[in-house]
């Protein structure tokens, strides 16, 4: 059973594994955007890239306004 397997793994190891996995994901995402930004800028042009960034920022701020209500419903 899954719960038996989880109980056999010490909590410190699970926390360490989860932390490392989380940081690896963040580094990959950061690297992806670092290399994609010049490509997207070239494809869209400066004006459209600015609009795209503005819309993306507004969507990100809008997700903060959720205040966790979506998970509770």
Image (tube, helix red, strand yellow):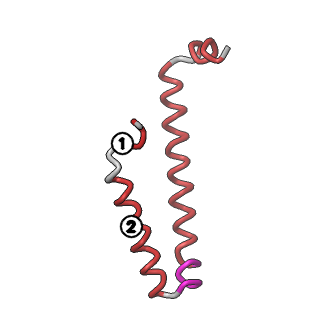
Q: Residue at x 48, y 28 (%)?
A: 15
Q: What mark, if any, has residue 57 been given in the picture?
A: 2
Pick the residue in front: 29 or 20: 29
Q: Magenta span: helix, strand or loop, mainly?
A: helix
Give the image location of residue 36, x and y in percent: 57, 71
Give the image location of residue 35, x and y in percent: 57, 70
Q: Residue at x 56, y 55 (%)?
A: 28
SS at mark 2 in the image? helix
Left or right for 51, reference 40: left
> Which of the two labelled residues, at mark 2 and mark 1, occupies the earlier sequence position?
2
Asked where in the image residue 47 lies, by quadrant, the reply is bottom left
Q: Where are the magenta residues, as a range?
A: 39-44
Left or right for 72, reference 18: left
Q: Residue furthest right?
A: 1
Neighbourhood count class around disc 1 (C-alpha, 10 Å): few under 14, some 14–19, many 20 upward: few
Eyeballing the image, is 73 above or below 50? above
Give the image location of residue 66, x and y in percent: 35, 49
Q: What mark, if any, has residue 68 been given in the picture?
A: 1
């Amino acid at each position: 059973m899954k719960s038996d397997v989880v109980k056999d793994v010490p909590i410190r190891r699970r926390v360490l594994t989860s932390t490392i996995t989380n940081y690896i994901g963040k580094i990959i995402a950061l690297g992806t955007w670092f290399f994609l930004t010049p490509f997207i800028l070239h494809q869209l042009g400066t004006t459209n890239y600015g609009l795209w960034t503005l819309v993306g920022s507004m969507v990100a701020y809008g997700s903060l306004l959720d205040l966790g209500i979506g998970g509770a419903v």
